Amino acid sequence: MTTEVKLSPQPTGLTAQVSLYPLRQEHLSPAIDAALARWRERGLEVQPGAMSTLIAGDEAAVWEALRDAFAAATAYGETVMVVTVSNACPWPPPAG
């Protein structure tokens, strides 16, 4: 007896919550602003917050933008970036 498993279509978008911590830098804003600019340049949805930023978009674009943003931030000095990524938490939330 064979059991058929039906898979639901995989989401193609990702949402990430990102916290960026520039270390040992006199001014923190330039590194953070550089990361925000990279995400926006990639056409991602960007919602900055006090402690983290939500970004959302196509899977490939999110991964590439995370790498680019980290490189842009580290151009200003040592940096820690903490990221939580999900394909199950759409943002912006669906209307309704």
Image (cartoon, rainbow, N blue to C red):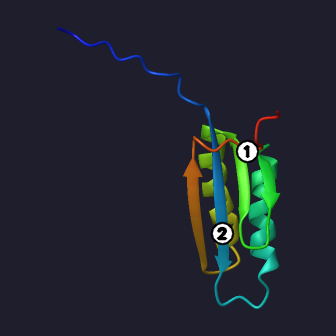
Q: Residue at x 67, y 51 (%)?
A: 65
Q: Position of residue 5 (x, y in %)?
A: 35, 17
- Pointers 2 and 1 in contact (C-beta within 8 Å): no
The image shows residue 1, relative to residue 95, as above or below, that is above
- The mark nearer the N terminus, 2 or 1, is 2
| Quadrant housing the C terminus | top right
Spatial distance from mark 2 to mark 1, Cα to Cα?
17 Å
User: Is residue 34 left or right of 81 when viewed as pictured?
Assistant: right
Q: Residue at x 64, y 85 (%)?
A: 23
| Quadrant housing the N terminus | top left
| Residue 87 or residue 6, whichever sits in front | 6
Q: Position of residue 40 (x, y in %)?
A: 81, 51
User: Neighbour class for label 2 at 10 Å: few (<14), some, many (≥20)?
Assistant: some
Quadrant assignment, res 59: top right
Q: Position of residue 68 (x, y in %)?
A: 66, 56
Q: Secondary structure at mark 2?
A: strand
Q: Residue at x 60, y 39 (%)?
A: 60
| Residue 19 or residue 65, whichever sits in front | 19
The amino acid type, in three-letter code, at marker 1 is: Trp
| Residue 78 or residue 95, whichever sits in front | 95
Residue 19 bears which disc, if any?
2
Nearer to us: label 2 or label 1: 1
The image shows residue 27, relative to residue 42, as above or below, that is below
Residue 91 bears which disc, if any?
1
The image shows residue 46, relative to residue 24, as above or below, that is above
User: Neighbour class for label 1 at 10 Å: few (<14), some, many (≥20)?
Assistant: some
